[in-house]
Amino acid sequence: MDIHIEPTPRLPMYPQQKTLKASDILIEQICQAYTPDDARRDSIYYWPQPLPTPEAHILPDPLVLFQGEPKASGKARQTLIPLTIQEILHRAPHESQKPSMQIPLGLIDKPESQQQETLVVDLHGSRGALTGGPLLLLGALNSGKGTALQTLLLWLTARYRPSQLICAVIDPNHDLELFRGLPQLAHTGKSLWTDGATDDEVIQLSNYCLELIAQRRKRYNSQRWNDDTFHQLWNTNEGLPIFLLIVSQYQRFTERPMASQALKKLIFSCAEARALGAYTVITAAEVGMRHLSADLLNKISTRISLFINEQQRAEFFGRIYPMDPIPGRGLLVTQDRQAHHIQLALPVMGANETERYEQLKYALKQIHWSQQR
Ligand SMILES: Nc1ncnc2c1ncn2[C@@H]1O[C@H](COP(=O)(O)OP(=O)(O)OP(=O)(O)O)[C@@H](O)[C@H]1O
C-alpha cells in the first residue's frame, strides 16, 4: 500500500528575532546577581546552557568545526575542535595513523545529566551495529543536510591525504562541488564527483566504485576479514585507502529506476564492505517506503534526523518528538534508545552564506596546498 506523504514545507531561512519577555529579563538579572560559579559553590546546578542556536541576525555561526584565525573570532562561537585547520593539517602526517572514521559533527544535549558532549559519528562502528556504521542524515529543505556533509568531508579531507582516502560523491544539489578539486575525490585521474544529472553518469560512477570494492576483495581474497583487519593492514603500509561513498539527496533518484537501482546496488555493496574500509553516508529529504525502502534502511545503523514535519517524524521515529526548525538542529536516538537533541556544526565561520562559501574555499585551498607538499 502506498503511503501518502505531504511534501515537507520549506523552512524559514531568516526567523524573526524574538521579542524579550518579562521572564527573560528577570532570568537575565538573576543570572547576573547570582552567577553559575556562585551557584556551583552552593551545590546548586543551573539548567544546562541550551545548545548553540544559529540566529540569522545575531550569531548565524555559533558552532563551528575548527577554531578560526584569532582575528576572525570576534563573537563567542563554540568550536568542536580546539585547533585551527592549519594545526590539524600540520599534525595529520605525524599522528600514529589509525584510519579512524570517528567524525566530530556537532554537539549532543544530555539535559538529564546536565551535559553537552561532542557528537561523534563513527562510520566504522566497531563496537556493534548501534555504535555506528552507515549514516543517514534526514531533513527537510534547508534543514542543514548539505552543510553537514561539508563539515564531515572537511574533517576527513583535512585528516587524510589522497593516498589514504578515496571519496565518491553523488551530489545533485552541488553542496560539495567545492571539494571537487581535491585529489581525494578522484582516482587514477578519474573524477569521482557527479551531480547525477543523467542515469548514465550515476551508472558509470556506481560501476567504477563497485569495481574498486571488488578489486579490494580480490586483492585480499585469502584474508579473513574482521572489524580490525582494515586497521591492521593500514598499519602495515599496505596502501589500502579508506573508501567513502556519499549519496546526497537520495530521494531525488527514487523516481529514476535505472539510477536508483545502480545506487542501491552500490550502497548495499559498500555497506557490506565496511570491514574492508568502505563507508557510506546518505542524505535524504523524504522518508517513507517509496523513498527509503526497508531493505535500504536496514543497512543504515546511524540515523540522524534534522528538522522534518510531524507526519514524517511519526513515520521515522515511531512517535512524535518535539523539534524546532533551526538549521543544523536535529534528533539522534542513541544506543540506550533515548532521543537527544543535537546541533550540527558549520564547517567554517562566516556571518552569512557568501562569507562561509569563501571561507570554505580558502580552507580547501589550504588542504590542497599542504597535501601537495
Ligand atoms: N549547523 C548549522 N548552523 C548554522 N546554520 C546552518 C547549519 N546548517 C545549515 N545552516 C544554514 O541553513 C541553510 C540551509 O542549509 P543546507 O543548504 O545545508 O540545507 P539542506 O538541508 O541541504 O537544504 P536542501 O535540502 O534545500 O538542499 C544555509 O543557509 C546554511 O548555511
Image (cartoon, rainbow, N blue to C red):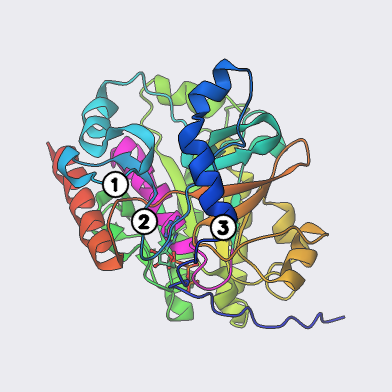
- Say which quadrant the N terminus sits in: bottom right
Does residue 151 show up magenta in the picture?
yes
User: Is residue 277 visible to the viewer in this orientation of the structure?
Assistant: no
User: What whole-number distance in Å separates the C-alpha atoms at marks 1 and 3?
Assistant: 26 Å
Does residue 160 show up magenta in the picture?
yes
Q: Is residue 255 left or right of residue 69?
A: right
Q: In this view, does 328 lie to the left or right of 224?
A: left
User: What whole-number distance in Å separates the C-alpha atoms at marks 2 and 1?
Assistant: 8 Å
Residues drawn in magenta = 139-166
Q: Name the residue under label 2.
A: 59
SS assignment at label 3: helix
Viewer-proximal residue, 251 or 308?
308
> In the image, what residue occupies the spot 73% across and 70% down?
310
The type of residue carrying mark 1 is Lys
User: Residue 22: which numbered mark, if any?
Assistant: 3
Callout 1: 10 Å neighbours few (<14), some, many (20+)?
few
